[in-house]
Image (cartoon, helix red, strand yellow):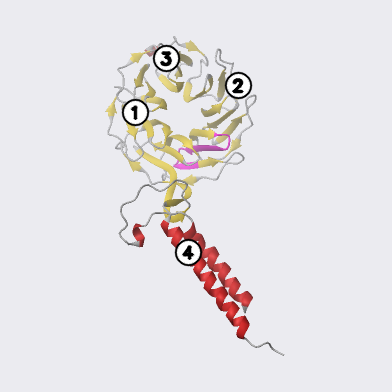
């Protein structure tokens, strides 16, 4: 009898006690999921997105507009260029650079966009990509296979890298290291001073994301991915046999996200890629940008954005911060601070254990022993 009661007490403590003893006030995080598409740009083709945090992203479209995300909503369009804005790169809430198909570049200072600065001859058919690591380092590419370097004040003249192949939007820089891809499946490595010669990975267009000089991930138009370890590229791993990959974004060696031409997203965990998760019907996902394992933003070719994030549920978990000053007690348990309810729960549990133990002792003293 005694062991049965003690078992009940233990179960009581583990369930009821676990709920009341822990401080209250925080929500338990669920696994990250993709939101439904949210339209903010009509049916216009969004060209690229760049995020630096859960509360700041910038997207650009084919009609020369830029849009700012503040963590909750997208701004209305800001008209930046009269031609397509092909690429954008942000390093902070006060510094973004976007380039257009006319060879022009525009800077964002946290409030407004600058007027155009032409840095590339129109004969080069426009700028295709840009990647910045700070306010004093950006690298841009054009359709004629040229690169242009920004030092915080001026842009260098165009210098050829990949002619006759055009350089795609697939350029990614980390510190003074860059990796670029072209439409013929070649990659080029910038070491802070010079570019390497071409390394052939495939025969189709490449998009690239690098987090350092020792880790890059590339995706191609045949659904293959390639991993760079600082010295060599891996052979192809096919993760999307039916569609081409349009964009890839990595935040660490153990997290990347890729999107394809048919509304699918793929997650990399450091070892393997997930199977396709359809997040946008059959819509062409153009670009994805991630800031952590729990936040990415993707945009498509019909003006939609989709958020990959953690949804919160109303489950009590421990609080790690001291409670804020509270209003005078009204006597209602619902208005108690996060630390009063746990105290009450602890006292209730202690009282219950004491009462049951006294009953057990009394029962043991008065029950005749069996002969």
Mark toward the start of the polypeptide (1 vs 2)? 1
Residue 215's place in the image compared with 368, above or below, is above
Mark toward the start of the polypeptide (3 vs 2)? 3
Q: Which of the pair 368/105 is nearer the observer? A: 368
Marks 4 and 3: which is nearer the front?
Answer: 4
Q: Label 1, secondary structure: give it.
A: loop
- For mark 4, does the 10 Å Cα neighbourhood hold few (<14), some (14 to 19), or many (20 or more) residues? few
- What are the residue bounds of the magenta stretch? 252-265
Mark toward the start of the polypeptide (4 vs 3)? 3
Q: Is residue 308 visible?
A: yes
Number of numbered markers: 4
Q: Residue at x 39, y 25 (%)?
A: 86
Q: Is residue 240 visible?
A: no
Residue furthest to the right: 371
Quarter in which the N terminus is drawn: bottom right
Marks 3 and 1: which is nearer the front?
Answer: 3
SS majority, magenta: strand
Marks 3 and 2: which is nearer the front?
Answer: 3
Residue 276 is labelled as none
Q: Which of the pair 189/128 is nearer the observer? A: 189
Q: Label 3, secondary structure: give it.
A: loop
Q: Residue at x 52, y 34 (%)?
A: 251
Q: Which residue carries the number 1 mark? A: 62
Report, in whole angstroms, how far the alpha carbon at label 4 lies from the one at label 3.
63 Å
Q: Label 2, secondary structure: give it.
A: strand
| The image quarter in which residue 239 lies | top right
Q: Label 4, secondary structure: give it.
A: helix
Q: Which residue carries the number 2 mark? A: 199
Q: Which residue carries the number 4 mark? A: 347
């Amino acid at each position: 009898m005694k062991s049965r009661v003690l078992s009940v007490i233990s179960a009581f403590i583990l369930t009821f006690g676990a709920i009341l003893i822990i401080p209250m006030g925080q929500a338990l995080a669920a696994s990250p999921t993709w939101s439904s598409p949210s339209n903010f740009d009509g049916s216009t083709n969004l060209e690229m997105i760049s995020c630096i945090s859960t509360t700041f992203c910038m997207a650009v479209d084919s009609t020369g507009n830029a849009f700012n995300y503040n963590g909750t909503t997208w701004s209305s369009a800001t008209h930046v260029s009269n031609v397509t804005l092909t690429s954008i790169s942000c390093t902070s809430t006060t510094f973004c650079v976007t380039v257009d198909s006319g060879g022009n570049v525009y800077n964002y200072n946290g409030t407004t966009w600058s007027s155009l600065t032409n840095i590339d001859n129109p004969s080069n058919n426009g700028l295709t990509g840009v990647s910045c690591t700070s306010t004093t380092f950006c690298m841009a590419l054009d359709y004629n296979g040229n690169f242009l370097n920004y030092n915080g004040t001026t842009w260098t003249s165009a210098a050829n890298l990949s002619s006759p192949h055009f350089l795609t939007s697939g350029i990614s820089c980390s510190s003074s290291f860059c990796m670029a891809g072209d439409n013929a499946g070649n990659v080029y490595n910038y070491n802070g001073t010079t570019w390497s010669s071409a390394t052939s990975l495939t025969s189709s267009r490449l998009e690239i994301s690098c987090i350092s000089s020792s880790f890059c991930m590339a995706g191609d138009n045949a659904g293959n991915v390639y991993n760079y370890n600082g010295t060599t590229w891996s052979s192809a791993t096919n993760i999307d046999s039916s569609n081409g990959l349009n964009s890839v974004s990595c935040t660490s060696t153990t997290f990347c996200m890729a999107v394809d031409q048919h509304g699918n997203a793929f997650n990399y965990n450091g070892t393997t890629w997930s199977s396709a998760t359809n997040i946008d019907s059959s819509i062409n996902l153009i670009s994805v940008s991630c800031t952590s394992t729990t936040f990415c933003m993707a945009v498509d070719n019909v003006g939609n954005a989709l958020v990959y994030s953690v949804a919160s549920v109303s489950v009590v978990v421990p609080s790690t911060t001291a409670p804020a000053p509270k209003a005078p007690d009204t006597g209602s348990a619902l208005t108690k601070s996060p630390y009063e309810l746990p105290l009450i729960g602890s006292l209730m549990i202690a009282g219950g254990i004491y009462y049951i133990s006294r009953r057990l002792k009394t029962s043991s003293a008065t029950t005749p022993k069996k002969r």
